[in-house]
Amino acid sequence: GDSVTQMEGPVTLSEEAFLTINCTYTATGYPSLFWYVQYPGEGLQLLLKATKADDKGSNKGFEATYRKETTSFHLEKGSVQVSDSAVYFCALSVGTNAGKSTFGDGTTLTVKP
Amino acid sequence: DADVTQTPRNRITKTGKRIMLECSQTKGHDRMYWYRQDPGLGLRLIYYSFDVKDINKGEISDGYSVSRQAQAKFSLSLESAIPNQTALYFCATSDGVRPQHFGDGTRLSIL
């Protein structure tokens, strides 16, 4: 079946540090890939997405590139802020028939001033 | 107003009680989903519905049931709650093409 593996957390960084959160996947078809962010006390919000190989999703300074050859979708940000502290989920969705997503376990990021 | 509204936001109850969590949406989406979130386990799908007459089990449906009362409403029930159902529950909606939209969650504690 489909699965998503994220790097284990928690991750603690200082403000302005470089962020990478690794994500790899296995899927039976050609998935769309997503990063969601969950701020404390809130639901998941879509951060960025990519729907085909070599696509780069970007939003709020975060980027992730769909790498089919390595089945990866690593999240990066060049300079994190305290306000980026949250839980980040990598997810995939295969085909429009299902529409449901398979999620990674989440990575908690804490950014210190 | 939130596009996807979950009620209640928090609930504490006792083992054996029947619990209903409600979800309503204003996005006009046909597809609705219930997930539970446990620490370190990400989100796991409980049930999903593609329209009012379509209900499907997810990966962890045992101990749960759902009702799709209308396009905009999708309820999750625990007929006889047990402590290992203590979790954060999320409702989500989708048009089947674009990414899902999530509610803010219901934190359920079963003593």
Image: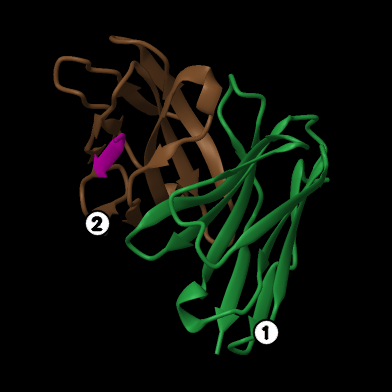
Chain colours: A brown, B green
Front position among marks 1 and 2:
1
Quarter of the figure with the C terminus of chain B: bottom right
- Asked if one can make out residue A81 in the rendered structure from this viewpoint, the answer is no
- Circle 2: residue type: Gly
Asked which secondary structure carries label 1, the reply is loop
Circle 2 marks a residue in which chain? A
Name the residue tied to disc 1. B17
The relative height of residue B96 versus residue B105 in the rendered view (above or below) is above
Task: Identify residue for label 2.
Answer: A9
Q: Is residue B40 magenta?
A: no
Categorize mark 1 by other alpha carbons within 10 Å: few (<14), some (14-19), many (20+): few
**Which quadrant of the figure contains the N terminus of chain B?**
top right
The magenta region covers A1-5
Q: CA distance from mark 1 to mark 2?
A: 35 Å
Q: Position of residue B77 (x, y in %)?
A: 68, 65
Left or right: residue A44 versus residue B65 is left
Q: Which residue sits at x=67%, y=73%? A: B10
- Indicate the amino acid at tag 1: Lys
Residue nearest the observer in this picture, A70 or B49: B49
Sort mark 2 into few (<14), some (14-19) or many (20+) by Cα contacts within 10 Å.
some
Task: Name the chain letter of the residue that bears numbered label 1.
Answer: B
Residue A31: horizontal and vertical position, in percent? 37, 21
Quadrant in which residue B110 is drawn? bottom right
